[in-house]
Image (tube, helix red, strand yellow):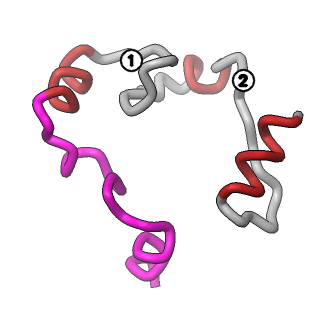
Amino acid sequence: MLATNDYRSGVGAHWTFLSDPGRKVQKDLDIAEYTDPEHNITRPELKAAWERGEHDRFYPYGKTYAQVFREQE
């Protein structure tokens, strides 16, 4: 609960912030975590692309929250 609140505060969220510390939802939905070395990467080709520096393949890498939200308008 504390970590979730820290994440929510860190991004300035004023809405419910969802958390999946056991990675249950991530595994059920087969969501790859390729930016965080502490968590598993389910598809080797994605990990390889990240390590080659092909970060533009991983939206929204390198963009601020403001940039991402502006693109949605």
Residue depicted at 47% across the width and 28% down the height:
31
Q: Please say whether residue 59 is one of the residues in the magenta stretch.
A: yes
Q: Earlier in the sequence, mark 2 or mark 1?
A: 2
* Dot 1: element: loop
Q: Position of residue 9 (x, y in %)?
A: 77, 57
The disc placed on residue 10 is: none
Name above or below for residue 21 compared with residue 15: above
Q: Which of 61 and 45 is in front in this view?
A: 61
* Dot 2: element: loop
- The residue pinned by badge 1 equals 41
Q: How crowded is mark 2: few (under 14 residues within 10 Å), some or many (20 or more)?
A: few
- The reply to whether the C-beta atoms of the residues labelled 2 and 1 are less than 8 Å apart is no
Residue depicted at 71% across the width and 47% down the height:
7
In the visual, does 61 lie left or right of 24? left
Q: Quadrant of residue 25?
A: top right
Kind of residue at disc 1: Ile
- The residue pinned by badge 2 equals 21
In the visual, does 64 lie left or right of 43? right
Kind of residue at disc 2: Pro
Residue depicted at 19% across the width and 51% down the height:
56
Residue depicted at 56% across the width and 17% down the height:
27
